[in-house]
Image (cartoon, helix red, strand yellow):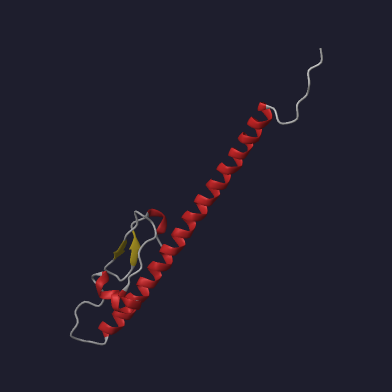
Amino acid sequence: MKLKQEPGFSLVELIVVIVITGILASAAIARYKSLSDATEAATCKQNQFNLETAQSFFYMDRYMDPDQTTRYAESFEELAPYFPEGRLPQCPSANGEYLLLPNGVVDCTDAGHHR
């Protein structure tokens, strides 16, 4: 008795294709995640640079006034006039926050975003 061969794919062939597709998808997702993290870090570092530039402008404005005792901004609100519409840049990371250091440097609390 001869078995009739039906056209189509066997169950084993379909499982192999699904497994290979899953492996390729996991590699693509891992690559996307690493690119996303690198983009966040670069954006954060650029924001820190922009805040430090505003800090320099603030310093120059204060330096010209001999009555001022503090030269650097003590809060971010003091730097708002140096940005369009007073909108300060924010860290793109969910757990990152900018800090004003006493020497005029701006730092981020996210470990991968330090300049």
> In screen coordinates, is 30 left or right of 110?
right
User: At which x and y percent is residue 3?
Assistant: 78, 17
When the figure is inspected, residue 5 is found, relative to residue 105, above or below; the finding is above
Residue at the far right in the pictured view: 2
Query: Which quarter of the figure has residue 23?
Result: top right
Give the residue at x 78% y 21%: 4
Camera-side residue: 47 or 70?
A: 47
> In screen coordinates, is 10 left or right of 53?
right
Camera-side residue: 7 or 30?
A: 7
User: At which x and y percent is residue 91?
Assistant: 37, 61
When the figure is inspected, residue 51 is found, relative to residue 28, above or below; the finding is below
Give the residue at x 58% y 38%: 22
Give the residue at x 34% y 54%: 95
When the figure is inspected, residue 110 is found, relative to residue 51, above or below; the finding is above
Quadrant containing the C terminus in the rendered view: bottom left
Camera-side residue: 10 or 109?
A: 10
Q: How many marks?
A: 0
Query: Which quarter of the figure has residue 63?
Result: bottom left
User: At which x and y percent is residue 13?
Assistant: 68, 30
Quadrant containing the N terminus in the rendered view: top right
Give the residue at x 38% y 67%: 48
User: At which x and y percent is residue 35?
Assistant: 52, 55
